[in-house]
Amino acid sequence: MSIVTDLTRSWLTRSWKPFTFRNEYDALLPYQDCENLGLYIHIPFCRSICNFCPYCKVRYEKSLCDRYIDSLLREIQTVGSQNSGRKQVTSLYFGGGTPALAADRLAEIIDTCREYFDITEGIGLELHPDNVNVPTLQKLQAAGVTKISIGIQSFQEKFQSTLGRKTVDMKAMSAALAAVPFETVSMDFIFALPDQTFEDLKSDIDTAFSVGANHIAIYPFIDFTFTKSTVSALPKKEKRALLDAITRYCLGKGYRRSSIWTFSSEAHAGYSSMTRDNFLGFGCSATTLLRDQFKINTFSVEEYCRRIGERKRPTSLTIRFTRRQRMVYYLFWTAYSTRVDSRDFEKFFGVPLKRMYGFELWLAKLLGFCTEKNGVYEMTLKGAFYYHYYENFYTLSYIDKMWGIMRKEAFPESIEL
């Protein structure tokens, strides 16, 4: 798998130089002139640990959670105070872990962010199904949350058992969502599980929209090497057929496709912390992407708190991008939305997209991966599948390796990808 990603990286960056992350940090982050800047906050606490989940998480303890949030507030204050005045940002997203476990302190966190940042497109937060109840939703709404994403994974007992999840009380969930409305109610599902069929996913999609969702995300199952999951994903041919069938079904129902995996029943509904040109990340494992660099915070809660207490940045690794490396990163994550606008690329980099990647775009159109109209490149069904297929290689070759190391070492010396 690494051969595929290595060759692709070398071709697109026009260099054999790997992506090299080093154990270094910057006291000051140059985000003041960044446009389309987003915010992300990681809350790593869970009541129980799902064996398939690759994200940074630890078992919840109230005292540890409070100490962590105290450190988190100091990190936000340190970074935010670098800017004179309030910096405009598109959005704020909370991920985890289970952020609702810190529901009593969310208003404090959001108010601290608002001291330094003007949030223009709303605030999103991930929820475990157990947290979808009226008291919790009311706390989130009062704190300023406008979008929620519920990690259902599957409504069906056979897959809940496979994933180690409990049965969802759909009647209670529907009642809670009706009682406390949000701008976006997204529900996450996993596809490409063993023996999963289109009818299984169709049932999940229909159920989601019937119980209160106006947005769904259907993510592929990826078997990370460092998790304890024993589940194996579907073969390539079956996976493609499933993804194509899901897409055709959702588009046939009139749902709007907003990314490779996401569809909404209402035009205003959207939930994505990924499709931002730049973003600031706060908390354990949170990443920061700026014009010429990418950073990732330590995965260790204890080391995170210690570094903040020492008035140091909790950055574990930093990569200083070459121009071509930054272009590849930009195109990879922009394409996640299924479209790339050449005008946006030129505005960001100051050079025409076709001048940098004209041959690749010609080839993509020739192979039927995308179409082009007025400088906007749109993925076809075929292109969307192969984006997913390559993203799977990328995840297992790059993210799996990096996260596997960082789960064991708080501050690795360096990592080459």
Image: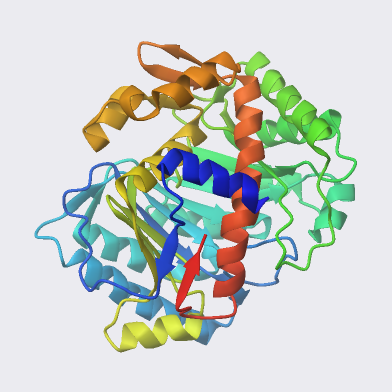
Image: 131 above or below 172: below
Nearer-the-camera pick, 369 or 355: 355
Looking at the image, the residue that sits furthest to the front is 16
> Residue 249, how many percent across, how many down?
71, 20
Judge left or right: residue 322 versus residue 53: left
Q: State the residue in front, 119 or 345.
A: 345
Provide residue 75's location: percent of width, then percent of height. Answer: 30, 73
Residue 253 occupies quadrant: top right
User: Measuring 17% from the left and 54% from the top, which residue is drawn there?
Assistant: 32
Is residue 239 visible in the rendered structure shown here? Answer: yes
Count every numbered label the image shows and give the total: 0
Look at the image and name its color scheme.
Answer: rainbow
Considering every residue shown, the one lying at the far top of the view is: 373
Residue 396 placement, left or right of 8: right
The picture places residue 135, in percent across and down from the top left corner, at 55, 59
- The residue at the far left in this view is 84
The structure residue drawn at horizontal position 32% and vertical position 51%, both measured from the top left corner, is 322
Image height check: is 227 above or below 184?
below
State left or right for residue 336 relative to residue 154. Answer: left
* Residue drawn at point x = 34 percent, y = 43 percent: 277
Res 104 quadrant in image: bottom left
**Depth check, front residue: 285 or 183:** 285
Residue 182 visible in image:
no
Residue 96 placed where, x, y %?
Answer: 54, 63
Work out whether 402 lies above or below 90: below
